[in-house]
Image: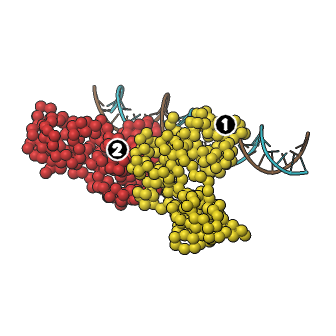
Chain colours: A red, B yellow, C brown, D cyan
Amino acid sequence: MLLSQTEENYLKAIYSLAYANSNKVSTTLISAALKTKASSVTDMIKKLADKDLVHYKKYQGVSLTEVGQKIAVEIVRKHRLWEVFLVNKLNYNWDEVHELAEQLEHIKSETLIDKLEAFLEFPKHDPHGDPIPDKNGNIEHHKNMMLSSVENGESCVVIGIKDSSDPFLKFLDKLQIQLGSNLKVVSKESFDNSMLIETATGSISISNQISKNLFVKKI
Amino acid sequence: MLLSQTEENYLKAIYSLAYANSNKVSTTLISAALKTKASSVTDMIKKLADKDLVHYKKYQGVSLTEVGQKIAVEIVRKHRLWEVFLVNKLNYNWDEVHELAEQLEHIKSETLIDKLEAFLEFPKHDPHGDPIPDKNGNIEHHKNMMLSSVENGESCVVIGIKDSSDPFLKFLDKLQIQLGSNLKVVSKESFDNSMLIETATGSISISNQISKNLFVKKI
DNA sequence: ACCTATTTTTAGACAAGTCTAAATATTTTA
DNA sequence: TAAAATATTTAGACTTGTCTAAAAATAGGT
Ligand SMILES: [Mn+2]
Ligand SMILES: [Mn+2]
Ligand SMILES: [Mn+2]
Ligand SMILES: [Mn+2]
């Protein structure tokens, strides 16, 4: 099955949205994610349904078939491996690689991505801490522990970013928080849910907005 | 100026054809190179002319403007650097990379190709011996010495392949002839212009077809 | 110079992906 | 449960790049 870039982008979008939300994804949600109009989405959904890549009943939302899901995961795999390449080999910063990976993920080849994976020495996570599916499509999701739920006095390591938008990544750079950073929760304000935390470089106060978007592992 | 992949492919095709032939390129030649119909070429030529990327007068053939040429060379640069990446870093064979580079050359980014070039340590030639234009578009063409014109008793090094088609490259593999191979011309048959040559691994007879397609430098 | 063969262009059509505007279905609210 | 608000689908149009078939221009041969 040879898909167009556009079709691949739809599948990937449906995959992320289905994961983030429940299961069935609405037309408007997709159109927002892809910056198209709802009517365009309806058209494409029909095409994908014809190819048995999505389940679709009018007005009922859409979900991926097994084949559709498999393809979506392959694209996610490509996206994340290319991101690793860009950051680890070409010295891009983690906030600069998304758009490029968005293009590179559509390169068609039977062998390329496995060779790239080997060259990168089989990374398990992309530069934003997101898990990289293996060549069979298996993927180890984060356990859902956010910094916001860590108790006073406890320490943890940053293992992932929920909102990988450029501005948020740049802001983390400024705070000198990276993947692997050790953080100790000193205190929590019940007033606004902000936190005082200790990092390698000092103590900082961070808003709930931020602590809700950092995946951590207790140590 | 943001061009579509198709437009870029046309510019690159016109560039190679203009270089291989005289200067003005005919509609049919382009359609043969791109495997489209002549009528499609006419349509696209008009669009490129509107964008001042080619000079075009009906029935008179087409040639690149300065801007058009600059863009074409940029695409050639990308193509060849990606080929180097695929061969040197991902361990592809030289006969496997063309189609992939054909896709990768269209990735849009201000910074990617210069970072890739640095990562590859500024190679001067692609895996087929073709020169890589620098970031300003300067390109050092081969001096036009083919193995076929080397005299009896003289030695030379293979520095490039004129016809980089998969079958020819595979055939050279079989003969154990690579870029950098030392060849000594033992004798030439006036009958069919075949040559007896000595390589590192032994003596072989090669047809004029082959010797006409190997760029060499005398030593 | 004229007729013929070839090349090139035009005209009209089609598929993919998108849009706007209008119609229809669903959901919310009262 | 019926009106109002919102979401989704349909209808018709447009752009890009392609094609086939037909018309027009050029090039060659006598
Ligand atoms: Mn994409
Ligand atoms: Mn990522
Ligand atoms: Mn190409
Ligand atoms: Mn090459």
Taking the image as shown, residue C23 lies to the left or right of residue C2, namely left
Q: Which amino acid type corresponds to the residue marked 2 in the rendered image? A: Tyr
Q: Position of residue D24 (x, y in %)?
A: 77, 37
Foreground residue among A47 and B151 = B151
Q: Is residue B72 left or right of residue A158?
A: right
Residue at disc 1, CB closer than 8 Å to ligand 3? no
Question: Dot 2 corresponds to which residue?
Answer: A92
Looking at the rendered structure, whether the residues under marks 1 and 2 are on a common chain is answered as no
Measure how far apart labels 1 and 2 are at the Cα level: 41 Å
Identify residue type, mark 1.
Answer: Tyr
Task: Report in which chain the residue with disc 1 lies.
Answer: B
Seen from the viewer's position, the closer of residues B66 and B204 is B204
Indicate the position of residue B174 as horizontal and vertical percent values: 54, 69
Rendering quarter of residue B211: bottom right
Position of B33 relative to B212 (above/below): above
Q: Position of residue D13 (x, y in %)?
A: 57, 32
Tell me which residue sits at (38%, 52%) in the image: A78
Q: Residue, x 49% and y 40% (percent of image)?
A: B136
The residue where tag 1 is placed is B56
Which residue corresponds to the image point at 62% horizontal and 70% vertical from the top-left?
B186
Residue A205 x %, y %:
15, 35
What secondary structure is found at the residue carrying circle 2? loop
* Residue A144 versus residue B155 in the image, above or below: above
> In the visual, does A174 lie left or right of C21?
left
